[in-house]
Image (cartoon, coloured by chain):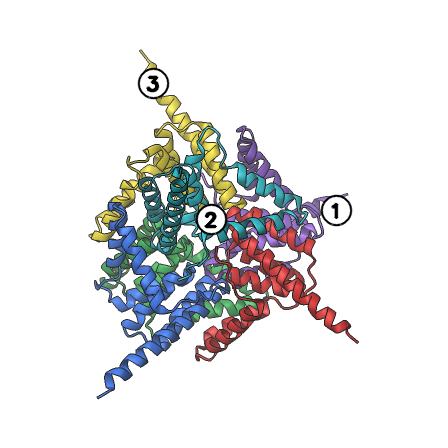
Chain colours: A yellow, B green, C blue, D red, E cyan, F purple
Amino acid sequence: MARRNNSLKEFRLYREKMNRKILASGNLQIQRFFNLDTRAYQSGVLSPKVKELMGLVASLVLRCDDCITYHVIRCVEEGVSDAEFFETFNIGLVVGGSITIPHLRRAVERLEECRRLDHRASKQRQLP
Amino acid sequence: MARRNNSLKEFRLYREKMNRKILASGNLQIQRFFNLDTRAYQSGVLSPKVKELMGLVASLVLRCDDCITYHVIRCVEEGVSDAEFFETFNIGLVVGGSITIPHLRRAVERLEECRRLDHRASKQRQLP
Amino acid sequence: MARRNNSLKEFRLYREKMNRKILASGNLQIQRFFNLDTRAYQSGVLSPKVKELMGLVASLVLRCDDCITYHVIRCVEEGVSDAEFFETFNIGLVVGGSITIPHLRRAVERLEECRRLDHRASKQRQLP
Amino acid sequence: MARRNNSLKEFRLYREKMNRKILASGNLQIQRFFNLDTRAYQSGVLSPKVKELMGLVASLVLRCDDCITYHVIRCVEEGVSDAEFFETFNIGLVVGGSITIPHLRRAVERLEECRRLDHRASKQRQLP
Amino acid sequence: MARRNNSLKEFRLYREKMNRKILASGNLQIQRFFNLDTRAYQSGVLSPKVKELMGLVASLVLRCDDCITYHVIRCVEEGVSDAEFFETFNIGLVVGGSITIPHLRRAVERLEECRRLDHRASKQRQLP
Amino acid sequence: MARRNNSLKEFRLYREKMNRKILASGNLQIQRFFNLDTRAYQSGVLSPKVKELMGLVASLVLRCDDCITYHVIRCVEEGVSDAEFFETFNIGLVVGGSITIPHLRRAVERLEECRRLDHRASKQRQLP
């Protein structure tokens, strides 16, 4: 249950496993909700990058660690720089107050973890 | 602290141990609050089953994992079917939005755990 | 204290007018969300009455006056009795705490307004 | 911006009228909850003044205008100074973030209204 | 349904009047907080437009009408198109759920009001 | 990630390590926010003890375990007695409702942990 202290890999595996079970439950409306959730962040008149930053701010002010982790991962994939991350964190912090700080700490830890994985992956790609 | 990743049994033991300590603190008003909390779900003009489903929806939209676990356990005891659970989850999901999804994943995991325990218990009762 | 001094009729007219505008905006995903919202309370393995009571509790603990008004209206249409309303309010109050009391006051005012309209309507039906 | 344009007097009258109706509903548990709510702020090992300040901070971070109004009135009765009010508002603001600012504006308006009433009352007492 | 029936002009006047009073209270830390709040949305590695969109989403999921009004005004000033507004509203709606819908209705009403004022102003500029 | 089940010592180390990283990020506004957060609880017209009790109530009604832990530690340092703690918990419980109970359990566990450490420390000071 609730898998805190887990690695990014464990986070992904648990998330995918449980999503599969929820979607397999046969409740059509929940399936549709999940579909709307996915599409909300796809390219439209706004870019996926801007939409993921919005998702990150919303997750921070609502103080949901798993949602923050998910959007940090996606923001890294969309090429968000560290300076952009911290300006975004600052907006979440000012809007949501000091009660968001414990989530900010974990967000920064997740960001570091993503950068390390990225770094390792890009190193492997450079091997002859 | 905060015992996530624990089994249903650990959840119950921790909950009972700490409730005992809180009630032993000598604060009469907290004792009365706990009493009101228990009675709110007892049979009245509405059945305990309907009341537990309400408690489950409230816990889901307020995003409290321990409260969700507690009401999932109680709903199973009141005979709530899987289809009823998922219609209830759907209401919580629509009202509370995608920010509830991480809690929904853990709710479904808890429900599976309850069903497994039930299944094992009913198997043991069938032994000669 | 925010008596939101509109009548039930004004509430309905404003709600319908703005919903029409939102749905006319051309954003397909918002239209789908509104559709999911409507369907969540329709008859399934759980009755509309039970689902509306759940919607009412969720609205109370999340402290949204307009959502409470909407579900009070729908609960009255589903035949919820005063005693059932107050057991439901009690669950919302215990789960959500005293911070919900201002919303409870307005919920009770809305319920009275619904009962008066109902009474007047049924009197008119009795005229020869 | 929701100036809730009622006076303090209207606030009190509406609050008392609706509380009477809620307590007259015959739901014993709601009556008990209201009783616990009243007693929580009475003198104990902590003074009513400190308890009302706590109630004010809690109302501010939970962003409930009516609750803020109530605790501002009570804090004035307990002799809280303007400087004490603003240190309390600052804690609420830092913990709860800029999302509390609209409520802070209305809190300050309510405080001014209380001070004016106090001033008028003390002037009347000085008349020969 | 809380039509907060003030105009945009009244909203601005009240906001400015009360901000002045709060800043005049002599509490240095509150002054600094207000300063941080202003600066969070200024140009950095992210543009003011993107930051205002983030502020709008955060305000929508936290369900603060005054904050929504403020960021709608600022987004219009930053040139946000209607299609961009509705993609942003959709993210807020999916993340925050149907409980945000009453705020979405008022957001759309505010947006219309801003567009009307803009239209009138641009017409006046065209006069010979 | 999210370090629940950790000791007070681990809590402190993680908190300090991540705060250092956040402050080292070079985002000046976040640094200023952290500074405002620290100063909000320092002695003013209200004592640090009263301010920490306010921080504790705010953390309880907003249901943030790490924030509760931090303020429990600080309250113990300010000499808050057990009876004062439980009157404070009661206010949080009444305002915030039964949804705060899981956090109350963990608050009481943290308080016990602080008392044990205090006891051990004072025993060591008594050694010849």
Q: Identify residue type, mark 1.
A: Gln
Please name the residue that numbered disc 3 is placed on: A124
Is residue B116 in sight in this rendering?
no
Rendered view: A48 above or below E19: above
Q: Chain letter for mark 2, please.
A: E
Of helix, strand and loop, which one carries label 3? helix
- Disc 1 residue crowd, few under 14, some 14–19, many 20+, Cα 10 Å: few
Nearest to the observer: residue A105 or residue F111: A105
Tags 3 and 2 in contact by the CB under 8 Å rule? no
Evaluate whether label 2 is on the same chain as label 1: no
Residue B21, image x, y percentages: 54, 61
Of helix, strand and loop, which one carries label 1? helix
Residue pushed farthest top? A128
Q: Identify residue type, mark 3.
A: Gln
Residue C126, image x, y percentages: 24, 86
| Left or right of residue A83, residue D127 in this image | right
Residue A118, image x, y percentages: 37, 25
Residue B126, image x, y percentages: 22, 63
Evaluate whether label 1 is on the same chain as label 3: no
**Nearer mark to the viewer, of 1 and 3:** 3
Quarter of the image for residue C74 reads: bottom left
Identify the mark at residue F126; answer none if there is no mark. Answer: 1
Rendered view: C123 above or below A9: below
Identify the mark at residue E67; answer none if there is no mark. Answer: 2
- Which residue is drawn at the image coordinates 62% and 50% (left, top)? E22
Evaluate whether label 3 is on the same chain as label 2: no
Nearest to the observer: residue B5 or residue A127: A127
Q: Identify residue type, mark 2.
A: Cys
| Left or right of residue F74, residue E12 in this image | left
Rendered view: B111 above or below D26: above
Nearest to the observer: residue E122 or residue E31: E122
